[in-house]
Amino acid sequence: MKQPWYSKRWANILLHCLAWVVLFSLPYFLKPSMDKHPEREPNRVIWEVYYILNNVVLIGIFYFHAYVLIPFFIYKKKFPLYGLIIASTLTGLVAFRWLFQTQVIRNEDFELNPTVLFSIFMLLFILAASTAYIMIKEKMRDDRIKSQTENETLKTELSFLRSQASPHFMFNVLNNMVALARKKSDQLEPSLIKLSSLMRYMLYETDEDQVPLEKEAEYLQSYIDLQRQRFGPNVKIDVNLDIEDGAYEIEPMLLIPFVENAFKHGTGMITEAHIEIKMTLKKNVLHFLVVNRYDPRSVELKDKTSGIGLTNVKRRLNLLYAKDHTLTIDRQNERFAVSLNINLH
């Protein structure tokens, strides 16, 4: 989607500049200062410099409060330190006005109390405007991300319904179950239960925005068990899905593409095929590791029905978890490793 002109960086900076120019030009248009204060006429240039410097200070306070104090002190609940910084800022404003009145223009009628009250009013106005600005900005950002997430979720869901349950994979699983039925194997019933659980999760439970991490782990385990039954002793599969705290939630179908990719590229004509899958949860950080051997000499054509793919998963991670995740993909020495860390809230 093409970005509108008003959301571009240059347009945002221009709008801010125009807003400040209009705001600080109002006193000149509404109440000419020299008409109301003829005593300032001899020091007109000095007053103009003071007015400009004062406005620059207020603008600096506005952005300092919006981008430093709010995210690093208010959001992190460091209220005593925040109060100390605001008090220091107020003291600085009062000292600035006092020095100008008493030391620069030598105003013998200067009174401290009105200056303090005016400084408090101006500071509160700037802080309120800064807070409103950052809240509106974050609300617009959240709405934009929500809209993008809804669109991406819809695309992912459609792609998932068409391709995640790969017909090739299902064909092999059903063939294995037919063989088990002919042998009257005891593994047939648990295999059917796993397949039923897998299909139920894929078709119904993924309608939610998020699912319990425990259910996502159960789905991965069912998928891996069916693949283990399919390949038998030809592929060594090491699995450790250690989820101690089931209170966390995750976006559905977010991890399976990495596992599916490992079975697609780590099996077949691979010497000593070995797939390692590990999931751990420490505090609120999910660590997910998938490692498989691969043959660099074999070039596989991408199957259109082989899932949503790593590219789409990267886009989804960037959209849903932004700075709350790190993804590392390492390919060397016939070893393909995917390491994913997600900060779950």
Image (cartoon, helix red, strand yellow):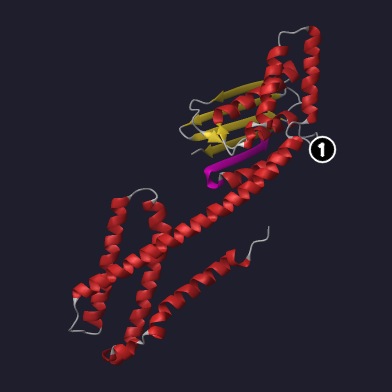
Whether residue 224 is situated above or below residue 16 in the rendered picture: above
Whether residue 121 is situated above or below residue 165 in the rendered picture: below
Residue at (21%, 80%) from the top-left corner?
A: 102
Whether residue 158 is situated above or below residue 226 in the rendered picture: below
Residue 257 shown in magenta: no
Residue 184 seen in the current view: yes
Residue 64 location, x and y as percent? 40, 62
What amino acid type should be assigned to the residue bearing mark 1?
A: Leu
The answer to whether 10 appears left or right of 53 in the picture is: right
Query: What's the magenta region?
Result: 322-333
Residue at (63%, 36%) from the top-left corner?
A: 207
Residue 324 shown in magenta: yes
| Residue hosting label 1 | 301
Q: Which quadrant of the figure contains the N terminus? A: bottom right
Q: Quadrant of residue 287?
A: top right
Packing grade of label 1 (10 A; few <14, some 14-19, many >=20) is: few
Residue 60 location, x and y as percent? 39, 68
Residue 224 seen in the current view: no
Q: Quadrant of residue 86?
A: bottom left
SS at mark 1 in the image: loop
Residue 47 location, x and y as percent? 32, 84
In this view, the residue in front, 188 or 206, is 206
Q: Main secondary structure of the magenta part?
A: strand
Residue at (42%, 64%) from the top-left corner?
A: 63
